[in-house]
Each structure stands twice: as C-alpha cells, then as structure tokens.
Amino acid sequence: MSAASPLKPEECNCFVVRSAARHVTQLYDQLLAPAELHVTQFSILAKLKRFSPITINALAKEMLMDRTTLGRNVLPLERDGLIKIEASVRDRRARNVYLTKAGDKRLQVALAAWAEAQARFETRFGAKRAADFRAMLRAVIASDFSAGSSKESAAARTPKPR
C-alpha cells in the first residue's frame, strides 16, 4: 500500500492477522476446554515439556511474548500446580519455570483435543494451504519490522559526505 493510495482499514495487515488469530484461537480454546486449558496455556506447557527448566525471560522470548503478558498466563498454571516457578540456583534474581508431573499429565490429556483442532483446521482450510500458511507466518515472525530496519531508513540515517 503506497502513501498515495486511499486509506483502506480493512486491508490493515495487523488487523487481518489479529482477526485470524482470534478466529483460530476460538477453535482451539473450544476443543481444549474439556482439558481446562486455553491454547496459550497449552502452548506454554508444550514449550516447558521441551525446555524445562527455563527462565521466565527465556520462555517469554521463546513464546514471542513480553514478560508481563507471560506472567499473567502462567499464574493460573502455577495456581493449579501445572508448573512450578522458583528462583534460579545460579542467579537468585532469575526465576526458573518447571513443568510439574500434573502439568505433564494435563498436557498429555490435552494433546488429543489439540490434535482434533489441528485436524479440523486442516480439513476446512486444506492441508497444503495450512502448511503454506504456517510457513508464511514463520517468515513474518522472522522479519525485522523494528523502526529503522528498512533499507530506506538505513539510507536516511547514513551521513552524506560533504
């Protein structure tokens, strides 16, 4: 979209991505409800299954979340005994997150519901399109959208010889 083109909010990339995320989240949350998990909580437990123990900061980075958002999401998991958060032995300022046996058990129960959500998405969207979609989203995640990351911005910041 060029600066000269008319403003079309319905073509806002962020709005469309967030709308799609909410739509897909509803599917996963609905199917994960019998396991008493939301998809974000399921994802946290799945990451902990792979990386436990991990610091809160490292988990936030792995989840592409800011630390405070992750903090709000882990509180119910800790309250329910699905994860344990303790000060790191090496650095008492750091907090390590552990998947508990109860958390692993809940994750195993939830895996069937998650698999059903995956299958339903792929049935309705198409397996090839779903795979391509995930690849495109991974490319978006890998893109640097920070201020000043474009070539034009870099050129604008480069001092011109006198």
Image (cartoon, helix red, strand yellow):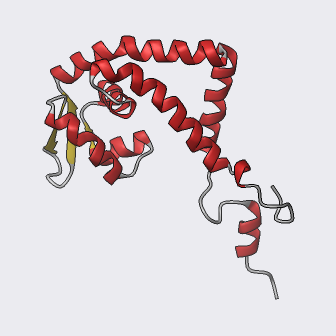
Q: Is residue 69 above or below residue 97?
A: below
Image location of residue 149, percent across then percent down: 65, 60
For the residue pair 19 and 48, the one nearer the viewer reads as: 19
Position of 55 compared to 155: left or right? left
Query: Is residue 97 shown to the viewer in this render?
Result: no
Residue at 71% across / 67% down in the picture?
Answer: 154
For the residue pair 109 and 11, the one nearer the viewer reads as: 11
Residue at 42% across / 17% down in the picture?
Answer: 114
Q: Residue furthest right?
A: 4
User: Toward which corner of the image does residue 79 lie, by quadrant?
Assistant: top left
Residue at 36% across / 14% down in the picture?
Answer: 111
Q: Is residue 77 above or below residue 131?
A: below
| Count of numbered labels shown in the rendering | 0
Image location of residue 70, percent across then percent down: 32, 45
User: Toward which corner of the image does residue 6 lie, by quadrant?
Assistant: bottom right
Q: Is residue 18 above or below residue 41?
A: below
Quadrant for the C terminus in the image: bottom right
Position of 123 compared to 115: left or right? right
Position of 22 compared to 50: left or right? right
For the residue pair 105 and 124, the one nearer the viewer reads as: 124
Image location of residue 161, percent across then percent down: 81, 83
Image location of residue 108, percent across then percent down: 29, 14
Q: Residue furthest bottom?
A: 162
User: Toward which corner of the image does residue 29 lie, by quadrant?
Assistant: top left
Query: Is residue 153 shown to the viewer in this render?
Result: yes
Residue at 21% across / 32% down in the picture?
Answer: 98
Quadrant for the N terminus in the image: bottom right
Position of 44 compared to 53: left or right? right
